[in-house]
Structure formats: C-alpha cells, structure tokens
Image (cartoon, rainbow, N blue to C red):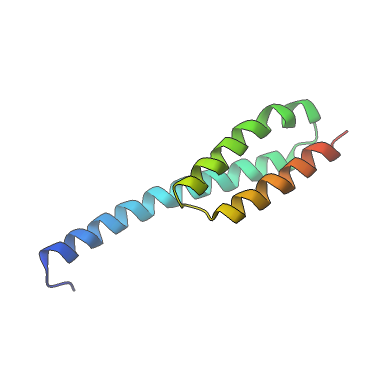
C-alpha cells in the first residue's frame, strides 16, 4: 500500500478516471457495433456523423489512440457506402 498522502490520492484519482474512460470506450464500441449491424442506408447515413464526432472526441482526450479513431471512421465509412 502507498505510504504517501499524494500517492493515496493519485490511486483514488486513477480509479475514478479509469472508470470514466471505460464507460466512454464501451459506449463507443456499442455505437460502432450498432452501425455495423445496420442494413438500412438512410439510418446508417444519419448515425455516422454522431459516431464520427464521438470517435474524434475520444481521440482528442486520449481515451483511444488517434490512429484507431481514424481506422474506425474509415472502415465505418466504407460500410455505410457499401449499403444499398
């Protein structure tokens, strides 16, 4: 266990931040999964900008890597374009 007051506080903060990051990462994964499961192009086109915005925000706050966000946006755009 930590011996310093500051390290005890840092552990507390890290737990809180990890929980926060886990929530947003899981929300992002669910949204991506939802878009990939769509077969209606109109619905997918309407949902894509929201997911794109979410990915950009998560990359900006370093919850996910910027390249991962770029790769996801690219693959989702391809999926939306393939829908008929």
Residue 21 versus residue 3 in the image, above or below: above
In x, y percent, where is residue 61?
44, 47
Residue at (30, 58) in percent of width and height: 14
Compared across the picture, whether 42 is left or right of 73 comes to: right
Is residue 34 shown left or right of residue 23? right
Residue 22, position in %: x, y?
44, 52
What residue sits 38% from the left and 48% below the top? 20
Describe residue 20's horizontal placement relative to residue 77 as left or right.
Answer: left
Instruction: Using the image, determine if residue 66 lies above or below residue 83.
Output: below
What residue lies at 66% left-to-right and 31% top-to-bottom?
Answer: 47
Q: In the figure, 71 relative to 6: above or below? A: above
Q: Quadrant of the C terminus?
A: top right
Q: Residue furthest right?
A: 84
Quadrant in the rendering for residue 28 = top right
At x 78%, y 43%, the residue is: 79
Q: Quadrant where the N terminus lies?
A: bottom left
Residue 68 vs 31, above or below: the answer is below
């Amino acid at each position: 266990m930590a011996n310093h007051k500051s390290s005890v506080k840092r552990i507390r903060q890290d737990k809180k931040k990890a929980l926060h990051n886990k929530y947003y990462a899981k929300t992002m994964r669910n949204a991506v999964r939802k878009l990939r499961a769509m077969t209606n192009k109109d619905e997918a086109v309407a949902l894509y900008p929201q997911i794109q915005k979410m990915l950009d925000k998560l990359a900006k706050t370093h919850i996910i890597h910027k390249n991962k966000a770029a790769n996801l946006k690219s693959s989702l755009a391809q999926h939306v374009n393939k829908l008929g």
